[in-house]
Image (cartoon, rainbow, N blue to C red):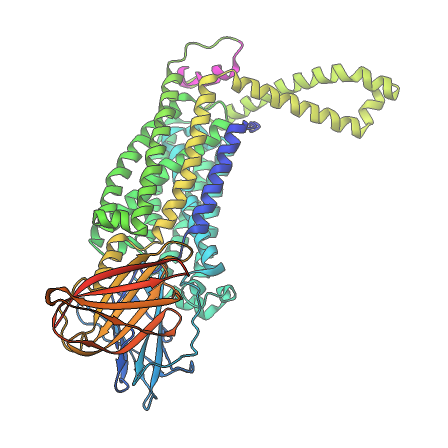
Amino acid sequence: MTTTAPRLGNALARLLILAAALLGTLLAGAAPASAHAALTGSDPKDGAVVATAPKEVNLTFSEQVALSTDSIRVLDPAGRRADTGEIRDLCSGSVVRYGVGLRAGLPDGTYTVAWQAVSSDSHPVAGAFTFSIGAPSTTSVALTDQAPGGGLVGVLYGIARYLSYAGFAVLVGGGAFVLVCWPRGASVRPVQQTVVRGWLTLTGATLALLLLRSPYTGSGKLSDAFDLAGLKAVLETKTGAALTSRLLLLGAAALFVAVLFGAYARRTDPKEKKDLAFGLGLGGTVVAAGIAGTWALAEHASTGLQPGIAMPVDILHLLAVAAWLGGLTVLLVALHKAPSVERSAVERFSKVAFGSVAVLAATGLYQSWRQVGSWSALTGTRYGQLLLVKIGLMAVLVGIAWISRRWTQRLAETTAPSPTSPTEEALNADDAPEAEAPEDAEDAEDADGADEASEAEEADEVDEVDEPTEAAASGGPAAAAVDPVRAAQLARQRAAVATARRKRERDADPERAGLRRSVLTEAAVAVVLLAVTTVLTSTEPGRTEEEAGRATSASGPAAVPDRPVDIRLPFDAGGVDGKGVVRLSLDPGRTGSNALHIFVERPNGKPLDVPEIKVALTLEAKDVGPLPVAPDRIQTGHWSASGVQIPMPGDWKIQVTVRTSEIDQTTIDKNVKIG
């Protein structure tokens, strides 16, 4: 069918611009995954001062990680490698621990341990800490400020992830829309183009993810995307296997698309068409579930709590998203570029969308419980906050879908069309017997011929109006026939008349115009929702973040010999750079002399340089204190004091005063048990 897309009104154009702006904001503000697998402990501990050099450095993680030969580096105060480069697997049962040996004869000073790994949910994680041999010293080690998976490579990787989700939704949802809701759409060219573009987008995005994977989890350099050694290493990982499997399944999807828009679209016998539709539906479901499984097998669903249940649930969730949002995309294209789409097709899609929403609600509830786990994680973690945004957008989307459903009902209640309304005649075409409906390509071509004949008639009217002028200007009709400028002008006039005619036909049908507007609004919100979902899949789950926080911070520990007291104190002094976290370590955390180390960090975990830090210790039960401690600045964000005396055991209040500017400061405190 030959049609021209309508021009959108100013309000709808502004809506799309707003959706694009929101999408850009979400993608630009999305920080890379910071700690999907968290470092829960180390030996030596962060900030510890040991008397003699240890033989090795051990790191303990909250979940399984993948390490390369260069994943753990120990650097001396001058920035030289102090480790042997041999990674040792020290895992035992549920304890995930790795170590690296140190060289013999290391001098005293402050050493930096920098580590980088890939967590079991496929996201890169990294970090660094220091320990000292003998006594702390200055260090020349300068670590990069770029977070793992950040920089240009991280941005490109995030865009490719978004496009892969969008391509999957359009490919799967578009194919389902044609088979289930609008079989005649298989012969409509704009629908064919939309589904094929979904396949091309998913295929191109998958290839980009495969090439970018090595620099994304490693060097961060875009030039390494074409490093064959890095690509070979990626193919040996779980993520590489998932992406390769996706490409193979996309080959099968290409066959599905070719049959759907080829043999299926040309079938005229009802029984043959029904049999072919059954085969396409069965095969397409298997292929779609397989492609969805490549996400479930490599990301959040494959690790953590109940992976055996979580992976099938994740596949169902992705298929429901595709059926709804992908079908919505194809419906929008059909409403704008194929005005003769039957109202029965819209009604069937309305039922499919309702079922998809029900599946999304059930699977989303389970995923939320699994990934968040508590009310505090829902509001106090980045994952939980993004989840609340997603829930809000889903609520808006369901509300708009309800409006679309009302428009669909109004379409069904429309009275018989007047003889002068071609659009309404097309709208009610599904009420006619099936033999009269244009269900195959030949009927579509007849409809195209009718459109072209109508356009030709209007063009003839233009010619009749303009030919006298042309004859007067050129001396006769023959001159007009050979004048290319005049011929081009007439062609533009014909196109303008045809476009205006089709616009009048659409505008003469207020129910269909209302449905188009509501579906377009629904699609705009879906664009933003898909962006939030993409960011959510690259964010550390709230349950994991809280568990890691409990493992790495002490909320009042009973101190034991050779085990420092570690506390974590969030603060907000106001002003610029007024928010952050103070990490305090008191070693060995018992009566007598102790070494105090304080680390001041921004909310994103990077060191924060503040003008002044003061500490006071008070044992209120015995009326002792406050005992002031004046730590010395070691380096950016690191303060230290030696010989801190704890005169007696008990529940001590540790007060920390942080001054972030000339006028901004705050005091925070915490009670700890010191034995």
Q: Position of residue 249 (x, y in %)?
A: 38, 51
Q: Is residue 465 above or below residue 289?
A: above
| Relative side of 450 to 359, left or right | right
Report whether residue 486 is seen.
yes
Q: Position of residue 98 (x, y in %)?
A: 27, 74
Could you say which quadrant of the image residue 402 lies in?
top left
Q: Position of residue 410 (x, y in %)?
A: 38, 17
Report whether residue 282 is seen.
no
| Relative side of 102 to 229, left or right | left
Q: Nearer the viewer, residue 137 or 87?
A: 137
Could you say which quadrant of the image residue 6 lies in?
top right
Magenta stretch, main secondary structure, is helix
Q: Nearer the viewer, residue 408 or 70?
A: 70
Q: Residue furthest bottom?
A: 105
Q: Is residue 268 above or below residue 321?
A: above
Q: Nearer the viewer, residue 651 or 395?
A: 651
Residue displayed at 47% across by 55% down = 155
Quarter holding the C terminus is: bottom left
The reply to whether the magenta stretch includes residue 389 is: no
Q: Is residue 559 above or below residue 245?
A: below
Residue displayed at 54% across by 28% down = 10
Q: Which residues are magenta?
A: 420-434
Q: Position of residue 641 (x, y in %)?
A: 29, 76
